[in-house]
Image (tube, rainbow, N blue to C red):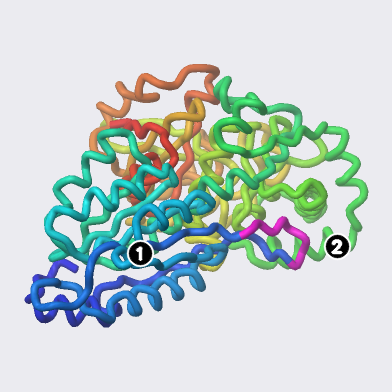
Amino acid sequence: MSNPLSRRQFLGATAGGAMIAGPLRTLPLMANEAEGWPKLPPVKIHKVYAGRTGGIYLSRPTDEIKKLDAYLDNVAKKLGGVQFVGGDLIPPAKVEEVAAKLKDADGVLLFHLSGHGGDSPVLGKLIDVGVPAAVFSQPFSGHGWMDFPKWQKAGKKVVLLPTSDWSELDQVVGLMRVAPRLRKTRIVVVRGPLGTAAACSAEQVKKRLGAEIVPITVEETLEAHRAVDAKAAEAEAQRHWISQAKKIVEPSKEEIVSAARFYLALKDIMIRNGARAITSSNCMGAPAKGCLAFSRLNDMGLVGACEGDMDSTLTMLMFADAFGLPGFISDPVIDTAKNALIHFHCTCATKMDGPGGKRLPFTIRTQSDSERGVSLDVEMRIDQPVTCAKFVNLDTMLISTGKIFDVTHDELGCRTQFWTRVADARSMFNNWCGGVLDGCTMTRLHRVVFYGDHLQNIRHLGTLMGFKVVEEV
């Protein structure tokens, strides 16, 4: 979209839609619901068109609404779990009547079609309803855009999209899925949560995000592990791990089968409890280390988080719903000599591009600290931009970006290791935790790494959900 367009070319591209819209990336909802995983209701997004179409002095063609409707139909099909409703045009519809229809929506898309300054009060009345909203205002849509930023400054939950790129609609719709899906989410927590005080409080998590924490004992995981059919566990191990590994170093086949059996046990626990996520502060204890189980869940579009880390669990849920991506929980260290943030840990998804992506090469190893159990050394993609994030205290997203430039296998670190070039490693070293995070070593240390640069979209998500974004730079 960097090439300049004449007015005639611009209008033709907008009417056709395809020339402006970038490629639409599918954001899978979760694992196959036919297997018993919880089915969530669709996110309902109300669309509203404001301004007049047609006429010699107005930029939008009369048929553009049909083009936008068709585009959004495609967005709904690709994203999944989204239902667009409404579609009123103001005028002739009255703004008060349309505003009354928005209260039951999960989000609102406002299309600024045209106007010469009198349009911002109309849009403002819709934003004042309080439903998270986005305003899509293409070039030549009138002069009211100058008033739009005041809504954000006043604390309104509205994302502003002054752009000709229709694919930004895909992104903001993905963001609008996060809050309503969290409100329908159950998280299994084995042997109690760890992290910030707010994230470890079931009451505060429920009040702030709507998610429900389901406590499970270690004994329940042991019982579930014993209940798994041995042949089913062996088939799972052979199909998903042994036959797919680049190589197997230390673990025996029996150990890999036990780890696969643990995944099937956790799967049964999650399905019985209607959960989309699980975290365990016993993930390095009996009946098997959780590294393979969590990797398997993350590959499927669900969330498996190690060490009972509730802040990271919530971060992974938010990114999964927004971008369809799994996260890698990291124990990072800094090297100022190479201006690098180094990430390493012993559990990692093998489909970092999402459930529909290709598996990365991986080697099956033991867990590095104990030199026992089953873990993964996953080889990340060189030159891949990444986002490093953690949602802490239920009110702040710590975030930074980088690019992978090296993959190592140093025995001093955990199994999966990769180096990312960052803006200023020295500044990051001095600004770690951004002045907003305290607690134990794990709480302060862990960050979650995702493929892609999502900084701007996370700023948008913060606007929609009402949390702060703090860059660790």
The amino acid on which the numbered mark 2 sits, given as a three-letter code, is Ala
Residue position for label 2: 232
Residue position for label 1: 93
Q: Nearer the viewer, mark 1 or mark 2?
A: 1
- Pinpoint residue 130: horizontal percent, then vertical percent: 42, 42
Q: Magenta segment, which residues?
A: 34-41
Q: Quadrant of residue 201?
A: top right
Q: Is residue 36 a member of the stretch shown in magenta?
A: yes
Q: Is residue 252 a member of the stretch shown in magenta?
A: no
Q: Is residue 234 above or below residue 251?
A: below
Q: Residues within 10 Å of mark 1 (few under 14, many from 20)?
A: few
Residue at the location (70% across, 62% down)? 242
CB-based contact (under 8 Å), mark 1 and mark 2: no
| Closer to us: 377 or 204 | 204
Residue at the location (89% across, 53% down)? 228
Residue 295 circle label: none
